Amino acid sequence: MELVDGVEVVENLPLVYLRGVKALVLSDLHLGFEEEAANQGMFIPRIQLRRSLEVLRRGLEVTDAGWVIFAGDVKHCFSRLLRSEREELSKLFEFLARQGVRVTVVRGNHDNYLPIVAKKYNVEIVKELIAGDILIIHGHFIPNEEYKGKIKTVIIGHEHPSLRLRDKIGYIVKLPAFLVAPYPKLQAKLVVLPAIGQYQTGTSVTLDPSTYLSPILRKEVPLDKIKPYVLAEDFGVLEFPELGLLEDLLAETIL
């Protein structure tokens, strides 16, 4: 499914393929989350790395991508490099090295200390990236207005968007989603990626700007024009109407 011109969802995976530059883009792996949770007394299965490798393996199998771009938050811990982060980042970059692909990390707000591991594997780390006519940033800051008229699409992560829907009897389901919206200030389209991390269920999509993490979504785009594309593993990618038309179905964020 094509979200915008040249940006395609691959099967029912939480990543996109950039046709013009033959690249896969994914975001918010949050490797090391399980160790950080354990340090706070919550013991959960270690599944983040396995999930990330499964998604990447399948994405590379079904496309001709020669470039993998991480749109930020590859690791989780802010304040240091955890032992599990070092181990899992090494396994991730070793896997990609064996595939013979170029690897670029667009640095997210969680990616402190990432260069300690990345430099061993010649992984490129940047603040923002232009790939053809597409700007890729993590999404925790507003891009410079100098890009106006020079790009067609902005791709971000950071938000971990999901759609919470309720039916007539009050049943609520929450599913990860891609978001597509006009970005008037840059005369472009905005694409928001769902998180790869299984524990990062993220922000429920609403019409209230105060519920969003990214300043781009809070301040820069018309929320009623956001179009969700929901990832439902049993059914594939489901295209929904714009949020302005979904208001009666959106579950309250406090639920």
Image: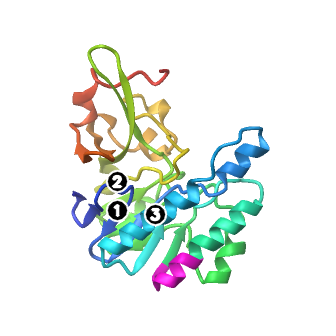
Residue 163 image-quadrant placement: top left
Which tag is nearer the camera, tag 2 or tag 1?
1
> What is the x, y in percent for residue 152?
28, 63
Q: Residue at x 30, y 71 (%)?
A: 62
Q: What is the three-letter code of the residue carrying label 2?
A: Val
Between the residue at mark 3 and the residue at mark 1, the CA separation in whole angstroms equals: 15 Å
The residue stretch that appears in magenta: 94-102
- Label 1: which residue? 16
Tell me which secondary structure the magenta stretch mostly adopts: helix
| Residue 27 against residue 6 in the figure, above or below | above
- Label 3: which residue? 54
Between the residue at mark 2 and the residue at mark 3, the CA separation in whole angstroms equals: 23 Å
Which tag is nearer the camera, tag 3 or tag 1?
3
| Label whose residue precedes the other's in the sequence (3 or 1) | 1
Kindly state the secondary structure of the residue where label 1 is placed. Answer: strand
Total marks shown come to: 3
> Horizontal placement of 140 versus 147: left or right?
right
| Label whose residue precedes the other's in the sequence (2 or 3) | 3
Q: What is the three-letter code of the residue carrying label 1?
A: Val
Residue 73 seen from this side: no
Mark number, residue 117: none
Q: What is the three-letter code of the residue carrying label 3?
A: Glu
Between the residue at mark 2 and the residue at mark 1, the CA separation in whole angstroms equals: 10 Å
Q: Do the numbered discs 2 and 3 sit on residues whose CB atoms are within 8 Å?
A: no
Q: Residues within 10 Å of mark 3 (few under 14, many from 20)?
A: few
- Label 2: which residue? 191
